[in-house]
Image (tube, rainbow, N blue to C red):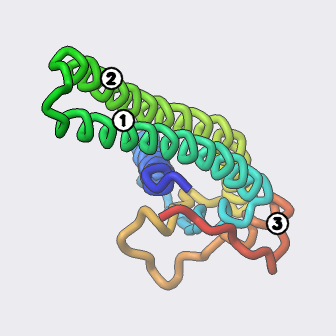
């Protein structure tokens, strides 16, 4: 798969979760702070990785990424061929300088095309990832909210975002999975690192 995409996926997921946690903390009225806090944790990355729609999203993204990789390979091969042709012409002392200049311009234009294609591919993959992940993230958030309301939790904090977890803070990951109808024995899809 498109390597930068995997890293981008993990970073975007983590950043989104951090922003959600910060927003939740900032939105608390002062009165809530005076009440007893009931806090739980959840491993949203685990929940997402076993969510059936996530596997399908990963498959679609990998398929699209492979198409971009194949096209990029073709463009690079074309560039290598043009460079080799140019080098042969440059070695021939009888080659007109105008021909060499034309070939240099061709190579430069192809390099620019490759860069533009690479940038466009990254942008398209990012858009596709956001499009496919939005309903998954919404479903997980809704399930976490339902578990939070049912358990009367003040906060449910993602285990990936927190730097400390008290041993008495309940882990509601299994309850969230149950809300999403994810079997307890479901195996995670390879999560991009």
Query: Which mark is nearer the camera, 3 or 2?
Result: 2
Query: Which mark is nearer the camera, 1 or 3?
Result: 1
The residue that appears at 70% across and 63% down in the rendered structure is 151
Residue 33 appears anywhere in the view: yes
Q: CA–CA distance between discs 1 and 3? A: 53 Å
Q: Secondary structure at mark 1?
A: helix
Residue 17 vs 46, above or below: the answer is above
Residue nearest the observer in this picture, 45 or 71: 71
Q: CA–CA distance between discs 3 and 2? A: 54 Å
In the drawing, does residue 19 fall left or right of residue 178? left
**Residue 181: x and y, percent?**
86, 62
The residue that appears at 62% across and 43% down in the rendered structure is 67
**Residue 152: x and y, percent?**
67, 59
Q: Are marks 3 and 2 in contact (CB under 8 Å)?
A: no
Q: Hey, which residue is sitting farthest front in the picture? A: 94
Which residue has dot 1 on it?
Answer: 82
Earlier in the chain: of badge 1 and badge 2, it is 1
Earlier in the chain: of badge 3 and badge 2, it is 2
Q: CA–CA distance between discs 1 and 2? A: 8 Å
Residue nearest the observer in this picture, 104 or 140: 104
Residue nearest the observer in this picture, 142 or 48: 48
Q: Hey, which residue is sitting farthest top in the picture? A: 98
**Residue 60: x and y, percent?**
71, 47
Which residue has dot 2 on it?
Answer: 106
Which residue has dot 3 on it?
Answer: 182
**The N terminus, quarter of image:** bottom right
In the drawing, does residue 99 fall left or right of residue 22? left
Residue 173 vs 94, above or below: the answer is below
């Amino acid at each position: 798969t498109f390597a930068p995409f995997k890293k981008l996926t993990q970073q975007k997921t983590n950043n989104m979760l951090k922003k959600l946690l910060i927003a939740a903390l900032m939105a608390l009225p002062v009165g809530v702070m005076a009440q007893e806090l009931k806090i739980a944790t959840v491993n949203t990355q685990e929940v997402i990785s076993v969510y059936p729609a996530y596997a399908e999203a990963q498959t679609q993204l990998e398929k699209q990424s492979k198409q971009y990789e194949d096209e990029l390979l073709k463009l690079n091969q074309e560039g290598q061929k043009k460079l080799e042709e140019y080098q042969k012409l440059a070695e021939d002392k009888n080659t007109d300088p105008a021909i060499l200049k034309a070939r240099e311009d061709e190579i430069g234009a192809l390099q620019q095309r490759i860069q533009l294609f690479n940038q466009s591919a990254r942008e398209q993959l990012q858009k596709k990832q956001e499009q496919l992940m939005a309903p998954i993230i919404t479903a997980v958030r809704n399930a976490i909210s339902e578990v939070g309301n049912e358990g009367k939790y003040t906060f449910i904090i993602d285990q990936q975002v927190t730097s400390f977890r008290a041993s008495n803070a309940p882990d509601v990951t299994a309850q969230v999975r149950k809300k999403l109808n994810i079997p307890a024995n479901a195996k995670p899809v390879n999560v991009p690192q």
